[in-house]
Image (spheres, rainbow, N blue to C red):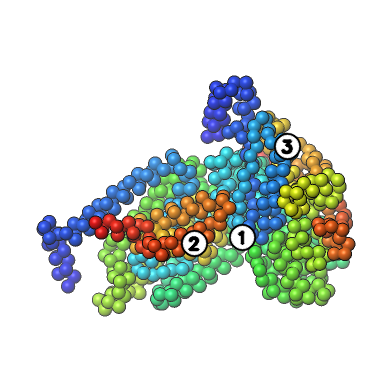
């Protein structure tokens, strides 16, 4: 059956006259590549115009939201506990650099791996349930993680791990220089982003989307759905951890804010605002939310109220999110 | 970066108005900018809060609004008691907003984080709102200063008074962060050194609203004194709930180790009467203080506590130091701050130690009974003076390695 439909698509693809759907898909992916290239060029030039630490914060959250979107947008699993991986990795990285004297890159990779292990443990329990129950199980487990970090001596309670040294990349490049750390963070972000893109566009990713569309049909086709879900969960946790570890190195601090449940909520908001199930959406949402938080922090208007209003507008007026609506408008033409 | 900007400013000024060039080159970016970073919406909003910003503005006005012929600017932000938010704001202030010094820094977790950043960036920070002795101890900075009170002064003042009154067994209710630990430990050390004993401790998160399980543990410990090693609304809530459990009626004493005029006012004289507390300043001590208190009252509708008066003093002393140094360059100003005596309405005979600790006399107060009060803010009876040399740790005992400062 698969071979049949597959050959059908290729055959129609070779004949331009009848290849309308395929050509449109191809042109859309070409637009995607162009947008991606412009975005990368813009990010390379950005630190000369905008405050670098601000863009680095945006990049960290953009990667976090992208990792979260892998689960919500492509498998249809709403995790309400992703802060555990983000914040947990931040603590691991900060501790590895500050106490064990790790080099920054290895600390970040170690922390991401740590988040992956946490993802495996939490995922094993959580994927047994669906819908609201899945969200509640992840929330409960991430709250357990929160209280472990609150009490564990190495996290220093409310103080957090402070004054984390940025150190030298591979012992050579001084990350205290703003541009050095910026390009380091950009490289990791692009790597993580590319990883998610690859996962989504691989056969594995297509199975995930099949599960999202109709889990029972995927099961009846012979896929071991639980394993696919668990694998996606672990991947998402690992990349979320990558983002958290990077944030700890950039901002030189790991605190309870990163593991608290509000952070899990924030990433849901970023993803929905930008457009879930789109590759660029979460990054756009993250940039928007971080910019607003930054801009309104010094004004007298409470940030949470404004973000709440925007969220309500998003749900009422553009449910697909910013990028989701943009794609719809383009494909309508 | 910094040199570039100074040079640029000098060239600009020299070109535009040549006569002013001689002074202008000494102030970076042509403005002396002080950032007040504290809690303006959480449990410490009355402890320091917007009122500290007002006190800082009063100091600038009293100084004349200008230093070395350059304007002085105060900016402020709410750090929400979160060290990560505080560090982000501080970093942005230093990197993009030309802030020369950050002050107030209520809550120890924030103060330690921002002092670490300031040290790295070579900027001055003066802490008035945080208590931990770590600031001038192991985590001291050549450009970091600790004004107003600290945990050692509180342990010696309030702890000492209660031990003297026969409180020889203690149980601690401790806020779960740097300030709480250091306050608990120093009070416990003091109690033990005077022959008392500590029966146990329990730690609660910052901004706890329900203290019942903690208070029950404290009650069942049988300790004569329950030491509240927390601050702000946490202490006020703990005291309120303790009265519901009948702890004081049961014969146990409550020791609010950090309690200021702001919390006494919030709790009310009825509930707060009889409490012993240590502060470094009170508005009704002398004419100068009363005059300042009156001016502050006119602007804010409340009397200042030691945090707000201390912020006034810190800003004033910083500006004096800039003037004496003839520049706002960090090292030169820090040198002046270390050397100059502190004589203002806040500290009568203050001096700054090599580790950055400002040493001056603290006072032990007792909250009046409601019927003894003559006016709305007439809360304290002065019980004793705690001389500066007893209240604060010497450089040697502080654990600060001052020999590393030169490097």
- Left or right of B41, for residue A311: left
Alpha-carbon span between mark 1 and mark 2: 27 Å
Residue at screen point 37% across, 51% down: A190
List x then y, in percent, for residue B76: 62, 47
Q: Residue B174 has which mark?
A: none
The residue lying toward the viewer, choosing from B206 and A18, is A18
Let me know if residue B396 appears in the view: no
Q: Answer with the quarter of the image where residue A149 lies.
A: bottom right
User: Residue B63: which disc?
Assistant: 3
Closer to us: B168 or A251: A251
- CA neighbours of label 1 inside 10 A, class few (<14), some (14 to 19), many (20+): many
Closer to the camera in the image, B224 or A212: A212
Q: Are the residues under marks 1 and 3 on the same chain?
A: no
Q: Residue at x 66, y 60 (%)?
A: B43
The residue singled out by tag 2 in the image is A308
Q: Residues within 10 Å of mark 3 (few under 14, many from 20)?
A: some
Left or right for B299, reference A100: right
Residue to which mark 1 is pinned: A158
Give whichever of discs 1 and 2 has the lower sequence position: 1
Percent position of residue B198, x then y: 77, 67
Which is in the foreground here, disc 1 or disc 3?
3
């Amino acid at each position: 059956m698969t071979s049949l439909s597959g050959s059908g698509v290729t055959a129609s693809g070779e004949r331009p006259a009848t290849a309308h759907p395929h050509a449109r898909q191809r042109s859309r992916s070409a637009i995607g590549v162009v947008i991606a290239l412009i975005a990368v060029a813009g990010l390379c030039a950005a630190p000369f115009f905008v405050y670098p630490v601000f863009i680095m914060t945006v990049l960290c959250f953009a990667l976090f939201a992208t990792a979260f979107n892998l689960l919500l947008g492509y498998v249809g699993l709403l995790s309400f506990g992703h802060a555990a991986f983000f914040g947990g990795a931040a603590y691991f990285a900060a501790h590895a650099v500050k106490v064990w004297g790790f080099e920054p890159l290895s600390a970040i990779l170690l922390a991401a791996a740590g988040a992956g292990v946490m993802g495996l443990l939490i995922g094993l329990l959580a994927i047994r349930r669906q819908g609201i129950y899945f969200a509640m199980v992840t929330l409960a487990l991430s709250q357990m993680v929160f209280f472990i970090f609150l009490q564990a001596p190495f996290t220093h309670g409310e103080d957090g791990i402070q004054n984390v040294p940025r150190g030298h990349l591979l012992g050579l490049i001084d990350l205290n220089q703003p541009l050095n750390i910026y390009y380091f963070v950009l490289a990791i972000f692009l790597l993580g982003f590319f990883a998610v893109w690859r996962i989504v566009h691989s056969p594995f990713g297509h199975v995930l989307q099949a599960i999202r569309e109709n889990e029972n049909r995927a099961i009846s086709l012979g896929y071991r759905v639980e394993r696919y879900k668990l694998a996606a969960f672990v991947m998402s946790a690992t990349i979320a951890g990558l983002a958290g570890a990077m944030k700890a190195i950039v901002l030189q601090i790991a605190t309870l804010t990163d593991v608290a449940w509000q952070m899990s909520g924030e990433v849901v908001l970023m993803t929905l605002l930008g457009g879930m199930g789109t590759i660029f959406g979460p990054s756009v949402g993250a940039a928007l939310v971080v910019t607003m938080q930054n801009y309104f922090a010094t004004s007298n208007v409470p940030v949470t109220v404004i973000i709440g209003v925007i969220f309500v507008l998003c749900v009422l007026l553009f449910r697909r999110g910013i990028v989701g609506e943009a794609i719809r408008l383009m494909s309508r033409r | 970066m910094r040199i570039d900007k100074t040079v640029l400013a000098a060239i600009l000024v020299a070109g535009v108005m040549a006569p002013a060039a001689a002074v202008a080159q000494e102030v970076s970016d042509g403005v002396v900018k002080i950032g007040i970073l504290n809690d303006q919406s959480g449990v410490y909003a009355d402890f320091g809060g917007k009122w500290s910003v007002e006190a800082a503005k009063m100091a600038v006005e009293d100084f004349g609004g200008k230093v070395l012929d350059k304007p002085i600017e105060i900016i402020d932000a709410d750090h929400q008691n979160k060290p990560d938010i505080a560090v982000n704001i501080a970093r942005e202030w230093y990197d993009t907003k030309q802030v020369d010094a950050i002050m107030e820094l209520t809550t120890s977790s924030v103060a330690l984080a921002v002092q670490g950043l300031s040290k790295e960036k070579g900027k001055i920070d003066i802490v008035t709102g945080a208590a931990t002795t770590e600031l001038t101890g192991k985590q001291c900075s050549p450009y970091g200063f600790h004004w107003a009170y600290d945990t050692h002064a509180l342990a010696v003042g309030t702890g000492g008074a209660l031990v003297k009154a026969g409180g020889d067994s203690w149980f601690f209710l401790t806020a779960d962060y740097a300030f709480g630990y250091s306050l608990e430990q120093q009070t416990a050390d003091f109690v033990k050194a005077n022959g008392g004993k500590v029966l146990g401790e329990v730690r609660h998160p910052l901004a706890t609203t329900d203290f019942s399980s903690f208070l029950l543990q404290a009650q069942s410990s049988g300790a004569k004194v329950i030491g509240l090693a927390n601050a702000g609304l946490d202490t006020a809530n703990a005291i309120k709930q303790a009265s519901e459990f009948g702890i004081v009626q049961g014969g146990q004493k409550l020791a609010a180790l950090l309690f200021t005029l702001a919390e006494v006012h919030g709790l009310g004289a009825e509930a707060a009467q009889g409490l012993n507390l240590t502060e470094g300043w009170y508005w009704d001590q002398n004419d100068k203080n009363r005059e300042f208190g009156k001016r502050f009252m006119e602007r804010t509708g409340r009397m200042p506590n030691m945090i707000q008066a201390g912020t006034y003093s810190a800003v004033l002393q910083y500006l004096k130091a800039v003037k004496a140094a003839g520049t706002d360059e960090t090292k030169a100003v820090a040198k002046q701050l270390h050397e100059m005596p502190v004589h203002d309405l806040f500290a009568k005979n203050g001096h700054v130690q090599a580790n950055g600790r400002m040493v001056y006399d603290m006072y032990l107060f007792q909250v009046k009974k409601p019927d003894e009060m003559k006016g709305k803010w007439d809360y304290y009876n002065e019980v004793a003076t705690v001389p500066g040399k007893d209240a604060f740790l010497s450089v040697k005992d502080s654990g600060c390695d001052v020999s590393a400062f030169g490097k």
